[in-house]
Image: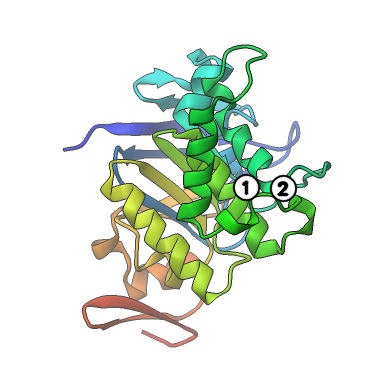
Amino acid sequence: MTAPILSVRDLHFGYAPGAPDALSGLTLDVPAGSTTVLLGPNGAGKTTLLHVILGLLTPRAGEVWIAGRRRAEWSRREAGRLVAMVPQNEYVPFDFSVLEFVLMGRTPHLPTLGMPSDADVATAMASLEALGLRHLWNRPVPELSGGERQLATLARALAQEAPLLLLDEPTAHLDLGNRTRLLSLIELLAARGSTVVFTSHDPGTAAPVARQIVLMRQGRVLAAGPASELLTSENLSTTYGVPVRVARIDGLPVVLPGVAP
């Protein structure tokens, strides 16, 4: 069995002293080289979990392990070489060009106060090419559409070349064409050995690419395991609290919300 690149053990987190846990006793393993989807309704704790993994939030109890070491033991630079994050929304306060923005992903690989090399620029341009954004390399980021900005943020994460990629609702602002491009890229990254963890409230988005599913509700893991086993009408109906039907077309799962199983 593939060793986990990410492990979470009995994690508890609350946003204020005395407030209820947003994450409660959460435990899971993410195998290296897998595509894992954190699936659940709004408020399930998916984004909170990513922020704890990244070190942006401090848990009340429990531990996060990355590549066999506690998250707290990694320096900021080391963590940046291990984990890349694509948030659902990100405010860019300055008129960085798309290339300058994507080059920020190279920061963990640069010496202190060092400037990007030609090789770093080539890596950034390759990331833009992979997402169909090369023609926008000189466009100011604030002038991009919401979908283009989301893809530019993903390109920055790709340029970081971290083995573990965390994506928070990555398809939220994308049209059908760019959503298809993104999901194809996720499959390609997994085929190359990268580990991708992304959140989604839409099981229909997760179904085509997920190898492992983590079903979450109210800050807890309801079930975790192979997508082929967990993407069932019963499991999704329990997770979302409404009738959900999972059918199969050409062997692929298709999720039909609002239809009793």
**Residue placed at 33% from the left, 56% from the top?**
187
In the image: residue 53, left or right of residue 230: right
Coordinates of residue 252 in the picture (x, y in percent): 27, 75
Mark 1 neighbour density, 10 Å: few (under 14) some (14–19) many (20 or more): some
Coordinates of residue 223 in the picture (x, y in percent): 36, 54
Residue 233, label in figure: none
**Residue placed at 65% from the left, 31% from the top?**
57
Q: Report the front residue among 161 and 138.
A: 138
Q: Name the residue under label 1.
A: 87
* Distance between mark 2 and mark 1 Cα atoms: 6 Å
Amino acid at circle 2: Glu
Q: In this view, does 22 lie above or below 10?
A: below
Amino acid at circle 1: Pro
Contact flag, marks 2 and 1 (Cβ < 8 Å): yes
Coordinates of residue 261 in the picture (x, y in percent): 36, 84
Coordinates of residue 232 in the picture (x, y in percent): 31, 71
**Residue placed at 69% from the left, 49% from the top?**
138
Q: What element carries label 2?
A: loop
Q: Mark 2 points at which residue?
A: 90
Q: Report the front residue among 177 and 71.
A: 177
Q: In this view, does 57 lie above or below 194?
A: above
